[in-house]
Structure formats: structure tokens, C-alpha cells
Image: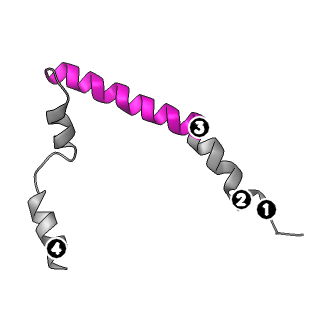
Amino acid sequence: MAEVGRLATCYEGRLMYAWLWRVIPGGPAVKSATFLVLFLGIAALLFLFVFPYVDGLMPFDNVTVDR
């Protein structure tokens, strides 16, 4: 449990993705645009490929409620 407390104090007040912000080249406008493109790209991949694949594996279509 001490490890969790140490990690919590280590990241207090820091940007969650600060390491990614430091790695991406350019000024704040370029970095913000890059983050936006990355976010939209990941969302598109999820909605177009991952979610449809996982939908076929989920048992939500097997309804067992009868009247």
C-alpha cells in the first residue's frame, strides 16, 4: 500500500500525459493539433474496427427473458 501512496504523491499536480507533451515537437498550437489528430484517429480506429469486432464476441444478443 505504501507504493500506491508514493505514486499518488509523485504525480500530484502534474499533467497526466506530460511525457507525451514533452516528446511531441513544436509549440503549444502544434502540440494541441497533434493531440487532437491522435485523439480523433484513435477514436476512429475504435469505432471502425475494435468495437465492431468485440460486438460479435459479446453475449448481449442472447436474451433469455420470456413473457
Residue 23 lies left or right of residue 42; in this view the side is: left
Residue 47, percent across and down? 56, 37
Q: CA distance from mark 3 to mark 4?
A: 37 Å
Q: How far apart are labels 2 and 1 at the CA level?
A: 5 Å
Viewer-proximal residue among 11 and 13: 11
**Which secondary structure, mark 1?**
loop
Residue 46: assigned label = none
**Residue 2 location, x and y as percent?**
14, 78
Q: Is residue 9 above or below residue 14?
A: below
Which quadrant would the C terminus be assigned to in this image?
bottom right
Horizontal and vertical percent position of residue 51: 59, 44
Q: Amino acid at mark 4?
A: Glu
What is the C-alpha distance between the residues marked 1 and 3? 22 Å
Question: Residue type at mark 1?
Answer: Asn
- For marks 1 and 3, the one nearer the N-term is 3
Q: Earlier in the sequence, mark 1 or mark 4?
A: 4
Q: Which residues are magenta?
A: 27-49
The image's mark for residue 62 is 1
Instruction: Tell me which residue sits at (24%, 26%) in the image.
Output: 32
Q: Answer with left or right where residue 52 lies relative to residue 38.
A: right
Q: Is residue 54 above or below residue 46?
A: below
Callout 2 touching callout 1 (CB < 8 Å): yes
* Residue for badge 3: 49
Using the image, determine if residue 1 lies above or below residue 65: below
| Secondary structure predominantly adopted by residues drawn in magenta | helix
Q: Which residue is mark 2?
A: 60
Q: Nearer the viewer, mark 3 or mark 2?
A: 3
Asked if marks 3 and 2 touch (Cβ < 8 Å), the reply is no
The amino acid on which the numbered mark 2 sits, given as a three-letter code, is Phe
